[in-house]
Amino acid sequence: MSPARRQRLTLAASITGAVVVALDGTVLTVAQPSLQRDLHASANAVQWTSTGYLIAVAALLVFAGRLGDRYGHRRVFAIGVAGFATASVGIGLAPGIDWVIALRVVQGVAGALLQPATLGMLRAVWPADRIATPIAVRTGAIGLSAAAGPLVGGALTAHLGWRAVFFLTILPAAAAGLLALAVPMPGPGPAEGAAGLDLPGAALLALTLACLVHTLVGLPARGWSPGSMLGLAAAVALGLAFARHEQRAARPLLPPAVLRSPEVAPALGVLLTASAAIFGTLFLATYFLQDVLALDPLQSALRGVPLAVTMVLAAPASAWLTKRQSTRATVLLAMILITAGVLLISRLDRSSGAVEIGAGFLLLGTGFGAVMATATAIVVRGASTADAGVAGGLQQTAMNIGPTLGVALATTVAGHAALGAALAPGALALAAIAALGALLATRLPGGGRTARASKIEAWPRCAMLPFRNPKQ
């Protein structure tokens, strides 16, 4: 098989796998009310269909990436999509809400396996200085699926029932797995095969992230209750234990070369702050549109179309811009656009029309599409091929933690006020988070892409100094 054909098929598998996960999350949101009525479930039980998945996937992403580094991303990806599809079938046939929650946790484990592998497979067949373009295409596809998800989910739920939304991803998942298995790919070399899995470190990181996500997800309902404070304290304590373990481990879970890269840490921070600002703002804006402006769900979704469209277009455009400028300039511009978009949303009131609302969403989508594509490429190319899975896991973790952090911040600022009425103060706080991301963008090296990538790729693994940080 020619290298070009291998790259095309790998990109198709990567996009399909990423789209399956993105589509599943968006269609579930639409189907949950119908699911609750049909299974006679409580609101808290239905919420756990999302919470259980999120905790499982966030806790295991980095370890799953390391599994790909050691045993091969294609193999781990195929197992992940097979598990995801099988769990989807089970959920579609589930007799009760307990089965749905349990299978959603299984689906989260499978999602953790496949998500870092979608990036690891790309890194295995594309050189570091050309990785930005396929990642930009992948990002655009994710944006398109996220936009189509509510429409597809709503149509399926209305005409075929909530179970149909879980059958939606079965065929694409099967196609993604077959594509991955059909593409010959370099297997793990001696360096990768010798890499340890660091099971104690993986367990500590998983517990840290599970406590953190569980605490953040519960904040909108419970606020800063004693249970929330205890969960946060547990996450901090476990995180410190993980950091101490990594400093002493002979073969740590988080490669020192990745963490010491001048690009990776700022890029992860940018992804975290950008996703927090975007999703926190969307959370508040949804309540504002429906509760304050009295728009129905369809009208609210139509107001957000500019965000979806510009996100799809901005992802590939950012790759073009990066080639002519620098990654720092591209990411900084994108974060400025996100900050401006959040500030514009914060100024909405009862007299705001479709133009003002659309303008804010347009800025958010343009900035977020560019940030996702460019910062993800920075993280992936900042790691050697031997550590591409861990790098992908770090990127995915930032993208999973960020939205929960943004929603938690928005609800904390709102306090006891109605969420729709708290748009202005909440969005201002989120704009500060976006501005922090812009500051982090200035920490990115400003030189040429090829030179930096080649420099990082050439670092000998034996020269990696022992420094780690729990970033996933």
Image (cartoon, rainbow, N blue to C red):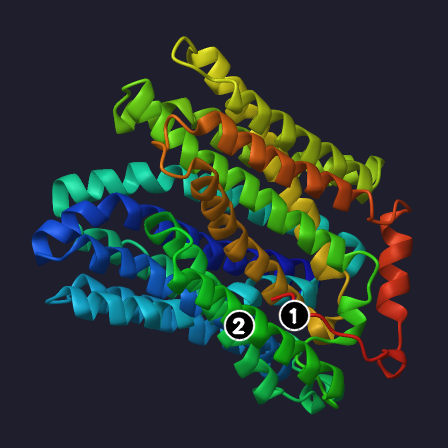
* x, y percent for residue 91: 22, 65
Q: In the image, is 239 to the left or to the right of 211? A: right
Q: CA distance from mark 1 to mark 2?
A: 9 Å
State if disc 2 and disc 1 touch (CB < 8 Å): yes
Q: Nearer the viewer, residue 440 or 61?
A: 440
Q: In the image, is 170 to the left or to the right of 325? A: left
Residue visible at 36% across and 37% down?
416
Callout 2: SS: helix
Q: Which mark is residue 470?
A: 1
Residue visible at 56% across and 68% down?
117
Q: Is residue 278 visible?
A: yes
Q: Disc 2 marks which amino acid?
A: Thr
* x, y percent for residue 363: 59, 26
* x, y percent for residue 203: 53, 82
Q: Residues within 10 Å of mark 2 (few under 14, many from 20)?
A: many
Q: Nearer the viewer, residue 402 or 462?
A: 402
Q: Mark 2 — residue?
A: 208
Q: Disc 1 marks which amino acid?
A: Pro
* x, y percent for residue 36: 15, 52
Q: Nearer the viewer, residue 210 or 103?
A: 210
Q: Nearer the viewer, residue 274 or 170?
A: 274
